[in-house]
Image (cartoon, rainbow, N blue to C red):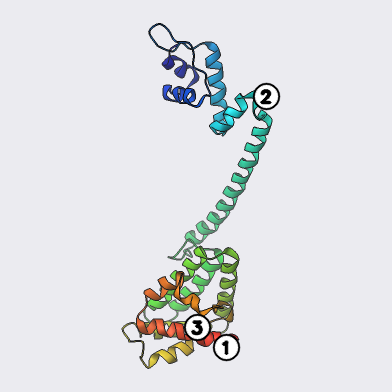
């Protein structure tokens, strides 16, 4: 058989046959006087086995081990390893589908935040913010949207345990009577500083109002953390007065937490 004929018989491409020769999975057959390879039934049987093994999900290195027989790993060892890997993938897919189900439910009921997808806990916090904003006159303060964006960013970049701790603190704060209303007053005050200089007289008052809302759990242990990582992105998007108000609020909160 010519290479195209054996490839058609087994259901693979001639290019794949040549690749298997290159990797040493399929021995080179004898060649005819004209230089063409001459494949036999035995070659077809081996190619069919290679195809079945790859369809199971084995990599070509693993196929080589199986074909090596006594010189390599037993087929049962390779299949057990493959089964374990598939079980891990199945568990990961199950977890992803579970998260997707939550997001679908939020989307179908109109509760998926614009910053989504986010965790269910963060989606609930953002929902509380949306309800508080809807109860107030006028459009939502721009700083509220920036706050949500920053929270969504932190959820992605900080370790999961740390993110859960910060989110828990924020939700506890938001659940206190009148806290969400006071938060929106601070958002509005920060919006009013959009075009102000760092020395604006309103900065201190706004900082103290913000500090009163900041949970002790979210205050950085090292205030130097405000000059790197996600904080850099956040402060770069603020005016001089807004950035000074937030930094001053965190310093006040840090002094309170000592």
Please, is residue 65 above or below residue 27 in the view? below
Label 1 sits on residue: 256
Residue 219 is situated, as x and y percent measured from the top left of the image, at 54, 79
- Identified at 44% across, 13% down, the residue is 37
Q: Is residue 70 visible?
A: yes
Q: Is residue 243 left or right of residue 161?
A: left
Residue 12 is situated, as x and y percent measured from the top left of the image, at 46, 23
Label 2 sits on residue: 70
* SS at badge 2: helix
Cα–Cα span, label 3 and label 1: 10 Å
**Contact, CB < 8 Å: mark 2 with mark 1?**
no
Name the quadrant containing residue 218.
Answer: bottom right
Cα–Cα span, label 2 and label 1: 71 Å
- Identified at 40% across, 6% down, the residue is 33
Task: Give the number of the mark in front: 3 or 2.
Answer: 2
**Contact, CB < 8 Å: mark 3 with mark 2?**
no
């Amino acid at each position: 058989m010519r290479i195209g004929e054996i490839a058609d018989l087994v259901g693979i491409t001639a290019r794949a046959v040549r690749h298997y020769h290159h990797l040493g999975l399929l021995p080179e057959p004898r060649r005819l006087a004209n230089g063409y390879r001459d494949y036999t039934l035995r070659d077809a049987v081996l190619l069919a086995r290679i195809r079945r093994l790859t369809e199971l999900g084995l990599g070509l290195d693993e196929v080589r081990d199986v074909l090596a027989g006594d010189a390599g790993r037993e087929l049962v060892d390779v299949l057990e390893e493959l089964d374990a890997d598939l079980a891990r993938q199945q568990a990961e897919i199950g977890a992803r589908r579970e998260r997707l189900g939550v997001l679908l439910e939020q989307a179908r009921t109109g509760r998926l935040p614009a910053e989504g997808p986010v965790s269910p806990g963060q989606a609930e916090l953002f929902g509380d913010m949306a309800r508080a904003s809807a109860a107030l006159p006028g459009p939502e303060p721009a700083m509220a949207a920036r706050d949500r964006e920053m929270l969504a960013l932190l959820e992605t970049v900080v370790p999961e345990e740390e993110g859960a701790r910060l989110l828990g603190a924020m939700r506890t704060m938001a659940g206190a009577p009148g806290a969400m209303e006071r938060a929106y007053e601070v958002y509005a005050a920060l919006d009013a500083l959009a075009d102000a200089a760092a020395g604006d007289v309103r900065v201190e008052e706004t900082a103290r109002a913000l500090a009163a809302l900041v949970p002790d759990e979210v205050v950085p242990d090292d205030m130097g953390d405000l000059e790197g990582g996600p904080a850099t992105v956040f402060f770069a998007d603020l005016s001089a007065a807004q950035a000074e108000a937030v930094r001053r609020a965190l310093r006040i909160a840090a002094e309170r937490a000592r």
